[in-house]
Amino acid sequence: MSGLLPENVATLAIDFSYLLVAFLFIMGLKAMSSPVTARRGIVVAGFGMLIGTLMSFLYPGMGNFPLMLAAIAIGGGLAWWSGRIVAMTDMPQMIALYNGMGGGAAAAIAAVELLRMAAADPAAGAHHGPVVTTLAAAGAFIGSVSFSGSLIAFGKLQGLIKRSLRFKGQQTANLLITAATVALGAAIVVSGHPSMQMVVGFFALALLLGVTMTLPIGGADMPVVISLYNAFTGLAVAFEGFVLENAAMIIAGIVVGSAGTLLTQLMAKAMNRSLANVLFSNFGEGAAAATEGVSGSLKPIEPSDAGVMMAFAQKVIVIPGYGMAVAQAQHKVWELCQLLIDRGVMVRFAIHPVAGRMPGHMNVLLAEAGVPYDLIADLDEINAEFDTADVALVIGANDVVNPVARTDKSSPIYGMPILNADKAKNVLVIKRGQGAGFSGIENHLFYLDNTRMVYGDAQKVAAELIHAVKAAG
Amino acid sequence: MEGVIALYIVMLAAFTGYEIIARVPVILHTPLMSGSNFVHGIVLVGAMVALGRADTVPEQVIGFVGVVLGAGNAVGGYVVTERMLQMFKASGQKKKESA
Protein backbone atom coordinates (compact mmCIF):
# COMPACT_ATOMS: atom_id res chain seq x y z
CA MET A 1 0.00 0.00 0.00
CA SER A 2 1.43 3.37 -0.88
CA GLY A 3 -0.08 6.80 -0.58
CA LEU A 4 -0.74 9.36 -3.26
CA LEU A 5 2.75 10.93 -3.00
CA PRO A 6 6.22 9.49 -2.35
CA GLU A 7 6.44 8.74 1.33
CA ASN A 8 9.04 11.33 2.36
CA VAL A 9 7.38 14.13 0.39
CA ALA A 10 3.98 13.30 1.84
CA THR A 11 5.30 13.21 5.41
CA LEU A 12 7.04 16.54 5.03
CA ALA A 13 3.98 18.14 3.46
CA ILE A 14 1.75 16.81 6.24
CA ASP A 15 4.12 18.00 8.96
CA PHE A 16 4.19 21.53 7.59
CA SER A 17 0.46 21.62 6.96
CA TYR A 18 -0.11 20.66 10.61
CA LEU A 19 2.12 23.52 11.68
CA LEU A 20 -0.12 25.79 9.64
CA VAL A 21 -3.20 24.15 11.15
CA ALA A 22 -1.96 24.82 14.69
CA PHE A 23 -1.19 28.43 13.76
CA LEU A 24 -4.64 28.98 12.23
CA PHE A 25 -6.41 27.38 15.22
CA ILE A 26 -4.61 29.60 17.70
CA MET A 27 -5.19 32.73 15.60
CA GLY A 28 -8.83 31.76 15.20
CA LEU A 29 -9.41 31.21 18.91
CA LYS A 30 -7.61 34.44 19.69
CA ALA A 31 -9.87 36.35 17.32
CA MET A 32 -12.85 34.78 19.05
CA SER A 33 -12.03 36.62 22.26
CA SER A 34 -13.47 39.90 20.99
CA PRO A 35 -16.97 40.34 19.62
CA VAL A 36 -15.65 42.48 16.80
CA THR A 37 -13.32 39.87 15.32
CA ALA A 38 -15.05 36.71 16.54
CA ARG A 39 -16.77 35.90 13.24
CA ARG A 40 -13.46 36.03 11.39
CA GLY A 41 -11.96 33.75 14.05
CA ILE A 42 -14.18 30.78 13.33
CA VAL A 43 -13.61 31.14 9.60
CA VAL A 44 -9.83 31.13 10.12
CA ALA A 45 -10.03 28.06 12.36
CA GLY A 46 -12.36 26.40 9.86
CA PHE A 47 -9.84 26.98 7.11
CA GLY A 48 -7.24 25.28 9.28
CA MET A 49 -9.51 22.29 9.77
CA LEU A 50 -10.07 22.01 6.02
CA ILE A 51 -6.35 22.05 5.29
CA GLY A 52 -5.63 19.47 8.00
CA THR A 53 -8.33 17.13 6.75
CA LEU A 54 -7.36 17.35 3.08
CA MET A 55 -3.66 16.85 3.79
CA SER A 56 -4.37 13.83 5.97
CA PHE A 57 -5.52 11.93 2.86
CA LEU A 58 -1.84 11.94 1.83
CA TYR A 59 -0.69 9.85 4.82
CA PRO A 60 1.54 7.08 3.57
CA GLY A 61 0.26 3.55 3.88
CA MET A 62 -3.41 4.35 4.09
CA GLY A 63 -6.27 2.45 2.52
CA ASN A 64 -10.03 2.19 3.03
CA PHE A 65 -10.59 5.49 1.21
CA PRO A 66 -14.15 4.74 0.07
CA LEU A 67 -15.10 3.89 3.66
CA MET A 68 -13.39 7.06 4.86
CA LEU A 69 -15.21 9.30 2.40
CA ALA A 70 -18.52 7.64 3.24
CA ALA A 71 -17.92 8.14 6.97
CA ILE A 72 -17.02 11.82 6.50
CA ALA A 73 -20.10 12.33 4.33
CA ILE A 74 -22.39 10.67 6.86
CA GLY A 75 -20.95 12.32 10.00
CA GLY A 76 -20.40 15.69 8.38
CA GLY A 77 -23.73 15.68 6.57
CA LEU A 78 -25.79 14.84 9.64
CA ALA A 79 -23.92 17.39 11.74
CA TRP A 80 -24.30 20.08 9.04
CA TRP A 81 -28.02 19.46 8.82
CA SER A 82 -28.62 19.33 12.56
CA GLY A 83 -26.42 22.35 13.20
CA ARG A 84 -28.36 24.40 10.63
CA ILE A 85 -31.83 23.62 11.94
CA VAL A 86 -31.26 23.65 15.69
CA ALA A 87 -32.99 26.50 17.51
CA MET A 88 -30.77 28.88 19.46
CA THR A 89 -32.54 27.87 22.66
CA ASP A 90 -31.43 24.26 22.07
CA MET A 91 -27.79 25.19 21.53
CA PRO A 92 -26.49 23.78 24.84
CA GLN A 93 -27.50 20.22 24.03
CA MET A 94 -26.19 20.41 20.46
CA ILE A 95 -22.79 21.58 21.68
CA ALA A 96 -22.83 18.77 24.24
CA LEU A 97 -23.64 16.31 21.45
CA TYR A 98 -20.90 17.45 19.07
CA ASN A 99 -18.46 17.50 21.95
CA GLY A 100 -19.40 13.95 22.89
CA MET A 101 -18.81 12.89 19.30
CA GLY A 102 -15.26 14.24 19.51
CA GLY A 103 -14.69 12.27 22.71
CA GLY A 104 -16.09 9.18 21.02
CA ALA A 105 -13.77 9.64 18.05
CA ALA A 106 -10.77 9.88 20.37
CA ALA A 107 -11.92 6.73 22.17
CA ALA A 108 -12.35 4.98 18.78
CA ILE A 109 -8.76 5.80 17.82
CA ALA A 110 -7.58 4.30 21.10
CA ALA A 111 -9.83 1.28 20.58
CA VAL A 112 -8.25 0.53 17.21
CA GLU A 113 -4.76 0.74 18.75
CA LEU A 114 -5.62 -1.37 21.77
CA LEU A 115 -7.42 -3.99 19.67
CA ARG A 116 -4.39 -4.22 17.43
CA MET A 117 -2.29 -4.86 20.52
CA ALA A 118 -4.71 -7.52 21.65
CA ALA A 119 -4.67 -9.19 18.24
CA ALA A 120 -0.88 -9.00 17.82
CA ASP A 121 1.22 -12.11 18.11
CA PRO A 122 2.81 -12.07 21.61
CA ALA A 123 5.99 -13.56 20.17
CA ALA A 124 6.48 -10.57 17.89
CA GLY A 125 7.26 -8.24 20.79
CA ALA A 126 5.14 -5.36 22.14
CA HIS A 127 3.26 -3.33 19.54
CA HIS A 128 3.66 -0.15 21.57
CA GLY A 129 5.87 0.79 24.49
CA PRO A 130 4.33 1.32 27.93
CA VAL A 131 4.34 5.13 27.64
CA VAL A 132 2.36 5.14 24.41
CA THR A 133 0.00 2.47 25.70
CA THR A 134 -0.60 4.50 28.87
CA LEU A 135 -1.43 7.58 26.83
CA ALA A 136 -3.72 5.58 24.55
CA ALA A 137 -5.52 4.12 27.55
CA ALA A 138 -5.78 7.49 29.32
CA GLY A 139 -7.23 9.07 26.17
CA ALA A 140 -9.61 6.15 25.82
CA PHE A 141 -10.78 6.59 29.40
CA ILE A 142 -11.32 10.36 29.24
CA GLY A 143 -12.76 10.22 25.73
CA SER A 144 -15.24 7.49 26.67
CA VAL A 145 -16.40 9.37 29.78
CA SER A 146 -16.80 12.52 27.70
CA PHE A 147 -18.73 10.57 25.04
CA SER A 148 -21.29 8.85 27.25
CA GLY A 149 -21.42 11.76 29.69
CA SER A 150 -22.14 14.26 26.92
CA LEU A 151 -24.84 12.00 25.51
CA ILE A 152 -26.53 11.92 28.92
CA ALA A 153 -26.17 15.70 29.18
CA PHE A 154 -27.75 15.95 25.72
CA GLY A 155 -30.61 13.68 26.82
CA LYS A 156 -31.24 15.74 29.92
CA LEU A 157 -31.15 19.11 28.18
CA GLN A 158 -33.30 17.82 25.33
CA GLY A 159 -35.84 16.62 27.89
CA LEU A 160 -35.40 12.95 26.96
CA ILE A 161 -34.20 12.19 30.47
CA LYS A 162 -36.52 13.92 32.89
CA ARG A 163 -35.28 12.89 36.29
CA SER A 164 -31.98 13.27 38.01
CA LEU A 165 -31.22 9.72 39.04
CA ARG A 166 -29.80 9.61 42.52
CA PHE A 167 -29.35 6.68 44.80
CA LYS A 168 -27.68 6.06 48.09
CA GLY A 169 -24.00 5.35 47.81
CA GLN A 170 -23.80 6.88 44.34
CA GLN A 171 -20.46 8.50 45.04
CA THR A 172 -19.07 5.23 46.31
CA ALA A 173 -20.35 3.49 43.20
CA ASN A 174 -18.71 6.09 40.95
CA LEU A 175 -15.49 5.77 42.89
CA LEU A 176 -15.55 1.98 42.54
CA ILE A 177 -16.18 2.19 38.79
CA THR A 178 -13.34 4.70 38.43
CA ALA A 179 -10.99 2.46 40.41
CA ALA A 180 -11.96 -0.61 38.38
CA THR A 181 -11.47 1.24 35.08
CA VAL A 182 -8.07 2.56 36.11
CA ALA A 183 -7.02 -0.89 37.37
CA LEU A 184 -8.06 -2.54 34.12
CA GLY A 185 -6.29 0.17 32.14
CA ALA A 186 -3.14 -0.38 34.18
CA ALA A 187 -3.39 -4.14 33.57
CA ILE A 188 -3.61 -3.49 29.82
CA VAL A 189 -0.49 -1.31 29.95
CA VAL A 190 1.47 -3.77 32.08
CA SER A 191 0.57 -6.83 30.02
CA GLY A 192 1.46 -5.22 26.70
CA HIS A 193 -0.66 -7.94 25.12
CA PRO A 194 -4.10 -7.44 26.62
CA SER A 195 -6.84 -9.95 25.99
CA MET A 196 -9.84 -8.89 23.96
CA GLN A 197 -12.03 -9.19 27.06
CA MET A 198 -9.83 -6.76 28.96
CA VAL A 199 -10.06 -4.13 26.23
CA VAL A 200 -13.83 -4.50 25.87
CA GLY A 201 -14.31 -4.44 29.65
CA PHE A 202 -12.16 -1.33 29.94
CA PHE A 203 -14.26 0.60 27.44
CA ALA A 204 -17.53 -0.66 28.91
CA LEU A 205 -16.54 0.54 32.38
CA ALA A 206 -15.34 3.93 31.14
CA LEU A 207 -18.59 4.47 29.21
CA LEU A 208 -20.60 3.42 32.26
CA LEU A 209 -18.74 5.93 34.41
CA GLY A 210 -19.71 8.78 32.07
CA VAL A 211 -23.36 7.76 32.49
CA THR A 212 -23.37 7.38 36.26
CA MET A 213 -21.35 10.56 36.71
CA THR A 214 -23.71 12.72 34.65
CA LEU A 215 -27.11 11.28 35.57
CA PRO A 216 -27.34 12.89 39.02
CA ILE A 217 -26.24 16.35 37.84
CA GLY A 218 -29.12 18.78 37.60
CA GLY A 219 -30.09 21.53 35.21
CA ALA A 220 -28.41 24.63 36.60
CA ASP A 221 -25.10 22.79 36.96
CA MET A 222 -25.07 22.01 33.23
CA PRO A 223 -22.84 24.96 32.25
CA VAL A 224 -20.10 23.50 34.40
CA VAL A 225 -20.59 19.98 33.08
CA ILE A 226 -20.67 20.91 29.40
CA SER A 227 -17.57 23.01 29.81
CA LEU A 228 -15.83 20.21 31.72
CA TYR A 229 -16.55 17.57 29.07
CA ASN A 230 -15.28 20.00 26.45
CA ALA A 231 -11.97 20.12 28.30
CA PHE A 232 -12.05 16.31 28.66
CA THR A 233 -12.44 15.78 24.93
CA GLY A 234 -9.57 18.19 24.29
CA LEU A 235 -7.30 16.17 26.57
CA ALA A 236 -8.39 12.87 25.05
CA VAL A 237 -7.62 14.21 21.57
CA ALA A 238 -4.18 15.35 22.74
CA PHE A 239 -3.41 11.92 24.24
CA GLU A 240 -4.39 10.13 21.05
CA GLY A 241 -2.30 12.72 19.21
CA PHE A 242 0.72 11.38 21.09
CA VAL A 243 -0.16 7.83 20.13
CA LEU A 244 -0.42 8.75 16.45
CA GLU A 245 2.51 11.20 16.64
CA ASN A 246 0.19 13.85 15.28
CA ALA A 247 1.34 17.36 16.33
CA ALA A 248 -1.87 19.09 15.20
CA MET A 249 -3.95 16.87 17.49
CA ILE A 250 -1.58 17.39 20.42
CA ILE A 251 -1.57 21.18 20.13
CA ALA A 252 -5.27 21.61 19.41
CA GLY A 253 -6.20 19.13 22.13
CA ILE A 254 -4.04 20.72 24.82
CA VAL A 255 -5.12 24.27 23.91
CA VAL A 256 -8.77 23.23 24.22
CA GLY A 257 -8.07 21.21 27.35
CA SER A 258 -6.44 24.13 29.12
CA ALA A 259 -8.94 26.73 27.88
CA GLY A 260 -11.80 24.41 28.83
CA THR A 261 -10.40 23.82 32.29
CA LEU A 262 -10.16 27.54 32.89
CA LEU A 263 -13.70 28.12 31.65
CA THR A 264 -14.95 25.30 33.89
CA GLN A 265 -13.28 26.95 36.86
CA LEU A 266 -14.86 30.30 35.98
CA MET A 267 -18.28 28.63 35.88
CA ALA A 268 -17.78 26.84 39.18
CA LYS A 269 -16.54 30.06 40.76
CA ALA A 270 -19.61 31.92 39.54
CA MET A 271 -21.65 29.46 41.61
CA ASN A 272 -19.22 29.71 44.52
CA ARG A 273 -18.76 25.95 44.44
CA SER A 274 -15.80 23.78 43.74
CA LEU A 275 -15.81 21.50 40.75
CA ALA A 276 -15.83 18.48 43.05
CA ASN A 277 -18.91 19.90 44.72
CA VAL A 278 -20.75 20.20 41.41
CA LEU A 279 -19.83 16.68 40.38
CA PHE A 280 -20.24 14.80 43.60
CA SER A 281 -22.70 16.57 45.83
CA ASN A 282 -26.42 16.25 45.57
CA PHE A 283 -27.40 19.86 45.35
CA GLY A 284 -30.66 20.75 47.03
CA GLU A 285 -30.26 18.31 49.88
CA GLY A 286 -30.85 19.93 53.22
CA ALA A 287 -32.14 23.07 51.58
CA ALA A 288 -35.58 22.62 53.10
CA ALA A 289 -34.55 24.51 56.22
CA ALA A 290 -33.82 27.58 54.14
CA THR A 291 -37.52 28.40 53.82
CA GLU A 292 -37.44 29.66 57.37
CA GLY A 293 -37.13 33.34 57.94
CA VAL A 294 -39.11 34.43 54.90
CA SER A 295 -41.17 37.40 55.91
CA GLY A 296 -43.77 39.14 53.83
CA SER A 297 -45.84 37.62 51.08
CA LEU A 298 -45.83 37.13 47.35
CA LYS A 299 -47.56 40.11 45.80
CA PRO A 300 -48.93 39.50 42.33
CA ILE A 301 -49.42 42.31 39.82
CA GLU A 302 -51.28 42.46 36.53
CA PRO A 303 -49.10 42.76 33.39
CA SER A 304 -50.94 45.96 32.46
CA ASP A 305 -49.88 47.64 35.70
CA ALA A 306 -46.37 46.27 35.40
CA GLY A 307 -46.15 47.68 31.86
CA VAL A 308 -47.14 51.13 33.06
CA MET A 309 -44.55 50.93 35.81
CA MET A 310 -41.83 50.31 33.24
CA ALA A 311 -43.15 52.83 30.73
CA PHE A 312 -42.68 55.63 33.23
CA ALA A 313 -39.35 54.44 34.60
CA GLN A 314 -36.05 56.11 33.77
CA LYS A 315 -33.91 53.06 33.96
CA VAL A 316 -34.82 49.39 33.60
CA ILE A 317 -32.43 46.50 34.10
CA VAL A 318 -33.53 43.20 32.58
CA ILE A 319 -32.27 39.97 34.16
CA PRO A 320 -32.96 36.99 31.92
CA GLY A 321 -32.71 33.40 33.11
CA TYR A 322 -33.44 29.91 31.93
CA GLY A 323 -37.19 30.64 32.04
CA MET A 324 -36.74 33.06 29.13
CA ALA A 325 -35.03 30.33 27.12
CA VAL A 326 -37.74 27.78 27.86
CA ALA A 327 -40.48 30.19 26.81
CA GLN A 328 -38.43 31.35 23.76
CA ALA A 329 -39.28 34.84 24.94
CA GLN A 330 -36.11 36.61 23.82
CA HIS A 331 -37.70 38.23 20.74
CA LYS A 332 -40.70 39.56 22.66
CA VAL A 333 -38.44 40.78 25.44
CA TRP A 334 -36.33 42.76 22.98
CA GLU A 335 -39.44 44.15 21.31
CA LEU A 336 -40.58 45.32 24.73
CA CYS A 337 -37.19 46.87 25.45
CA GLN A 338 -37.11 48.65 22.11
CA LEU A 339 -40.47 50.25 22.92
CA LEU A 340 -39.06 51.39 26.25
CA ILE A 341 -35.91 52.73 24.60
CA ASP A 342 -38.05 54.68 22.13
CA ARG A 343 -39.80 56.28 25.09
CA GLY A 344 -36.45 57.39 26.46
CA VAL A 345 -36.11 54.70 29.11
CA MET A 346 -32.57 53.50 29.64
CA VAL A 347 -32.50 49.73 29.28
CA ARG A 348 -29.69 47.40 30.22
CA PHE A 349 -29.43 43.62 30.32
CA ALA A 350 -27.69 42.00 33.26
CA ILE A 351 -26.30 38.53 32.71
CA HIS A 352 -25.18 36.20 35.44
CA PRO A 353 -22.30 33.94 34.36
CA VAL A 354 -24.28 30.76 35.00
CA ALA A 355 -27.69 31.94 33.83
CA GLY A 356 -29.11 29.30 31.55
CA ARG A 357 -27.68 25.92 30.71
CA MET A 358 -24.29 26.67 29.22
CA PRO A 359 -21.69 29.39 29.65
CA GLY A 360 -22.97 32.55 27.97
CA HIS A 361 -26.34 30.97 27.08
CA MET A 362 -28.32 34.18 27.64
CA ASN A 363 -25.93 36.26 25.53
CA VAL A 364 -26.52 33.99 22.58
CA LEU A 365 -30.30 34.18 22.91
CA LEU A 366 -30.28 37.95 23.24
CA ALA A 367 -27.96 38.21 20.25
CA GLU A 368 -30.39 36.07 18.28
CA ALA A 369 -33.19 38.46 19.11
CA GLY A 370 -31.01 41.33 17.89
CA VAL A 371 -29.99 42.90 21.17
CA PRO A 372 -26.75 44.84 20.56
CA TYR A 373 -24.03 43.45 22.77
CA ASP A 374 -23.13 46.82 24.22
CA LEU A 375 -26.48 46.90 26.04
CA ILE A 376 -25.53 43.66 27.78
CA ALA A 377 -23.52 43.83 30.97
CA ASP A 378 -22.11 41.08 33.14
CA LEU A 379 -22.23 40.83 36.88
CA ASP A 380 -19.28 43.01 37.85
CA GLU A 381 -20.24 45.84 35.53
CA ILE A 382 -23.91 46.05 36.40
CA ASN A 383 -24.15 45.39 40.12
CA ALA A 384 -23.36 48.98 41.11
CA GLU A 385 -26.11 50.21 38.80
CA PHE A 386 -29.06 48.54 40.51
CA ASP A 387 -29.18 51.37 43.07
CA THR A 388 -30.08 53.79 40.31
CA ALA A 389 -32.54 51.51 38.51
CA ASP A 390 -36.25 52.15 38.81
CA VAL A 391 -37.22 48.67 37.73
CA ALA A 392 -35.36 45.36 37.75
CA LEU A 393 -37.21 42.98 35.47
CA VAL A 394 -36.40 39.37 36.35
CA ILE A 395 -37.43 36.97 33.59
CA GLY A 396 -37.33 33.34 34.60
CA ALA A 397 -34.22 33.72 36.72
CA ASN A 398 -34.20 32.61 40.31
CA ASP A 399 -31.15 31.54 42.30
CA VAL A 400 -28.88 34.08 40.59
CA VAL A 401 -30.90 36.95 42.14
CA ASN A 402 -31.55 35.41 45.55
CA PRO A 403 -30.25 37.83 48.20
CA VAL A 404 -29.78 35.04 50.75
CA ALA A 405 -26.54 34.32 48.91
CA ARG A 406 -25.30 37.55 50.50
CA THR A 407 -26.96 37.32 53.88
CA ASP A 408 -27.78 33.81 55.07
CA LYS A 409 -24.72 31.81 56.01
CA SER A 410 -26.73 28.63 56.41
CA SER A 411 -28.02 28.76 52.85
CA PRO A 412 -26.49 26.32 50.35
CA ILE A 413 -25.92 29.15 47.92
CA TYR A 414 -24.32 31.46 50.50
CA GLY A 415 -21.35 33.26 48.98
CA MET A 416 -22.43 32.80 45.37
CA PRO A 417 -22.04 36.11 43.54
CA ILE A 418 -25.52 37.30 42.60
CA LEU A 419 -27.11 40.13 40.67
CA ASN A 420 -28.29 42.66 43.24
CA ALA A 421 -31.79 43.02 41.82
CA ASP A 422 -33.12 43.66 45.32
CA LYS A 423 -31.34 47.04 45.34
CA ALA A 424 -33.55 48.39 42.57
CA LYS A 425 -36.47 50.64 43.52
CA ASN A 426 -38.97 48.17 42.11
CA VAL A 427 -38.56 44.54 41.19
CA LEU A 428 -40.80 42.79 38.69
CA VAL A 429 -40.51 39.02 38.51
CA ILE A 430 -41.93 37.08 35.58
CA LYS A 431 -42.36 33.52 36.72
CA ARG A 432 -44.39 30.55 35.61
CA GLY A 433 -45.57 29.46 39.04
CA GLN A 434 -44.89 29.76 42.72
CA GLY A 435 -42.31 26.95 42.99
CA ALA A 436 -38.78 27.39 44.22
CA GLY A 437 -35.77 27.45 41.88
CA PHE A 438 -33.55 24.61 40.76
CA SER A 439 -31.80 24.53 44.10
CA GLY A 440 -35.11 24.27 45.95
CA ILE A 441 -34.31 27.37 47.95
CA GLU A 442 -37.00 29.94 48.63
CA ASN A 443 -36.09 33.23 46.99
CA HIS A 444 -36.29 36.05 49.50
CA LEU A 445 -36.26 38.58 46.68
CA PHE A 446 -39.79 37.52 45.76
CA TYR A 447 -41.06 38.45 49.23
CA LEU A 448 -39.57 41.94 49.44
CA ASP A 449 -41.86 44.95 49.84
CA ASN A 450 -40.77 46.41 46.50
CA THR A 451 -41.22 43.15 44.56
CA ARG A 452 -44.24 42.32 42.42
CA MET A 453 -44.82 38.96 40.79
CA VAL A 454 -46.15 38.59 37.26
CA TYR A 455 -47.23 34.99 36.83
CA GLY A 456 -47.31 33.35 33.44
CA ASP A 457 -45.30 32.11 30.49
CA ALA A 458 -42.50 34.59 29.82
CA GLN A 459 -43.37 35.04 26.17
CA LYS A 460 -47.07 35.67 26.87
CA VAL A 461 -46.31 38.05 29.69
CA ALA A 462 -43.81 39.94 27.53
CA ALA A 463 -46.51 40.32 24.85
CA GLU A 464 -48.93 41.67 27.44
CA LEU A 465 -46.29 44.06 28.73
CA ILE A 466 -45.72 45.34 25.18
CA HIS A 467 -49.44 45.96 24.92
CA ALA A 468 -49.44 47.81 28.23
CA VAL A 469 -46.47 49.99 27.33
CA LYS A 470 -48.07 50.92 24.00
CA ALA A 471 -51.32 51.77 25.78
CA ALA A 472 -49.45 53.97 28.26
CA GLY A 473 -49.17 56.51 25.44
CA MET B 1 8.44 12.07 18.26
CA GLU B 2 11.01 12.84 20.94
CA GLY B 3 9.39 12.59 24.36
CA VAL B 4 10.84 15.79 25.78
CA ILE B 5 9.95 17.82 22.69
CA ALA B 6 6.41 16.56 23.01
CA LEU B 7 6.35 17.79 26.60
CA TYR B 8 7.52 21.22 25.46
CA ILE B 9 4.68 21.28 22.95
CA VAL B 10 2.21 20.38 25.69
CA MET B 11 3.47 23.04 28.06
CA LEU B 12 3.45 25.82 25.48
CA ALA B 13 0.06 24.79 24.14
CA ALA B 14 -1.36 24.75 27.68
CA PHE B 15 -0.16 28.31 28.30
CA THR B 16 -1.55 29.37 24.95
CA GLY B 17 -4.97 27.95 25.75
CA TYR B 18 -4.99 29.64 29.13
CA GLU B 19 -3.91 33.00 27.75
CA ILE B 20 -6.45 32.91 24.95
CA ILE B 21 -9.43 32.47 27.21
CA ALA B 22 -8.27 34.36 30.31
CA ARG B 23 -9.49 37.75 29.12
CA VAL B 24 -12.58 36.76 27.20
CA PRO B 25 -15.71 38.76 28.01
CA VAL B 26 -18.60 36.70 29.39
CA ILE B 27 -20.65 37.58 26.34
CA LEU B 28 -18.43 35.33 24.22
CA HIS B 29 -18.29 32.35 26.54
CA THR B 30 -20.68 30.28 24.48
CA PRO B 31 -19.09 30.94 21.07
CA LEU B 32 -15.64 30.41 22.52
CA MET B 33 -16.60 27.14 24.15
CA SER B 34 -18.30 26.11 20.97
CA GLY B 35 -15.28 27.29 18.97
CA SER B 36 -12.88 25.25 21.07
CA ASN B 37 -15.34 22.39 20.72
CA PHE B 38 -14.87 22.78 16.97
CA VAL B 39 -11.08 22.92 17.29
CA HIS B 40 -10.86 19.53 18.98
CA GLY B 41 -12.71 18.24 15.95
CA ILE B 42 -9.18 17.87 14.57
CA VAL B 43 -9.58 14.41 16.09
CA LEU B 44 -11.07 13.70 12.67
CA VAL B 45 -7.59 13.46 11.11
CA GLY B 46 -6.54 10.95 13.75
CA ALA B 47 -9.65 8.89 13.12
CA MET B 48 -8.92 9.01 9.38
CA VAL B 49 -5.43 7.61 10.00
CA ALA B 50 -6.86 4.94 12.30
CA LEU B 51 -9.37 3.90 9.64
CA GLY B 52 -6.84 4.22 6.82
CA ARG B 53 -4.52 1.77 8.51
CA ALA B 54 -7.20 -0.65 9.68
CA ASP B 55 -6.77 -4.18 8.30
CA THR B 56 -9.32 -6.33 10.09
CA VAL B 57 -13.07 -5.91 10.04
CA PRO B 58 -13.41 -4.91 13.72
CA GLU B 59 -10.74 -2.25 13.23
CA GLN B 60 -12.50 -0.99 10.13
CA VAL B 61 -15.85 -0.83 11.93
CA ILE B 62 -14.44 1.09 14.88
CA GLY B 63 -12.37 3.32 12.60
CA PHE B 64 -15.47 4.04 10.53
CA VAL B 65 -17.43 4.99 13.64
CA GLY B 66 -14.50 7.16 14.72
CA VAL B 67 -14.45 9.06 11.44
CA VAL B 68 -18.23 9.54 11.51
CA LEU B 69 -18.01 10.94 15.05
CA GLY B 70 -14.95 13.07 14.30
CA ALA B 71 -16.51 14.55 11.17
CA GLY B 72 -19.67 15.25 13.18
CA ASN B 73 -17.63 17.06 15.83
CA ALA B 74 -15.75 19.17 13.29
CA VAL B 75 -18.66 20.07 11.01
CA GLY B 76 -21.28 20.46 13.74
CA GLY B 77 -18.93 22.54 15.85
CA TYR B 78 -18.22 24.84 12.93
CA VAL B 79 -21.83 25.29 11.87
CA VAL B 80 -23.21 26.18 15.29
CA THR B 81 -20.29 28.45 16.19
CA GLU B 82 -20.58 30.32 12.94
CA ARG B 83 -24.33 30.68 13.39
CA MET B 84 -23.92 32.09 16.87
CA LEU B 85 -21.15 34.52 15.99
CA GLN B 86 -23.12 35.80 13.04
CA MET B 87 -25.70 37.16 15.44
CA PHE B 88 -23.40 39.25 17.58
CA LYS B 89 -23.46 42.82 16.48
CA ALA B 90 -22.86 46.20 18.00
CA SER B 91 -25.74 48.63 18.22
CA GLY B 92 -24.14 51.38 16.09
CA GLN B 93 -26.57 54.25 15.83
CA LYS B 94 -29.07 52.70 18.18
CA LYS B 95 -26.50 53.01 20.91
CA LYS B 96 -26.58 56.78 20.71
CA GLU B 97 -30.34 56.86 21.02
CA SER B 98 -30.40 54.73 24.13
CA ALA B 99 -27.40 56.29 25.83
Image (spheres, rainbow, N blue to C red):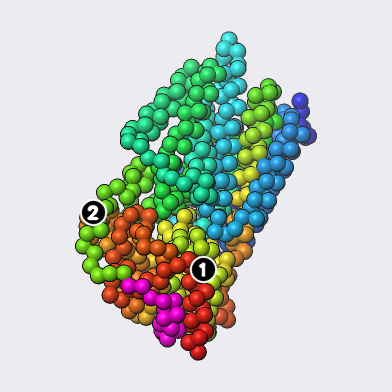
Horizontal and vertical percent position of residue A130 = 49, 23
Q: Residue at x 50, y 28 (%)?
A: A204
Query: In the image, what residue type sits under mark 2?
Result: Ala
Give the numbered dot on residue A289.
2
Magenta stretch contains residue A300: yes
In this view, which residue lies farthest toward the bottom?
A473
Q: Disc 2: which chain?
A: A
Q: Are marks 2 and 1 on the same chain?
A: yes
Q: Earlier in the sequence, mark 2 or mark 1?
A: 2
The image shows residue A238, relative to residue A464, as above or below, that is above
Residue A369 visible in the current orientation: yes
Horizontal and vertical percent position of residue A264 = 43, 50
Give the numbered dot on residue A459.
1
Q: Nearer the viewer, residue A45 or A308?
A: A308
Q: Nearer the viewer, residue A364 or B42?
A: A364
Q: Residue at x 34, y 54 (%)?
A: A439
Give the numbered dot on residue A230.
none
Q: Residue at x 62, y 64 (%)?
A: B86
Bounds of the magenta segment: A299-314
Total marks placed: 2
**Are there few (<14), some (14-19), or many (20+) residues within 10 Å of tag 1?**
many
Residue B71 placement, left or right of A137: right
**Are there few (<14), some (14-19), or many (20+) residues within 10 Å of tag 2?**
few
Horizontal and vertical percent position of residue A133 = 51, 26
Residue A18 visible in the current orientation: no
Magenta stretch contains residue B8: no
- Quadrant in which residue A13 is drawn: top right
Q: Quadrant of the N terminus of chain A?
A: top right
The image shows residue A112, relative to residue A465, as above or below, that is above
What is the spatial separation of the Cα atoms under label 2 and label 1, in whole angstroms? 33 Å
What secondary structure is marked by label 1?
A: helix
Q: Residue at x 68, y 23 (%)?
A: B57
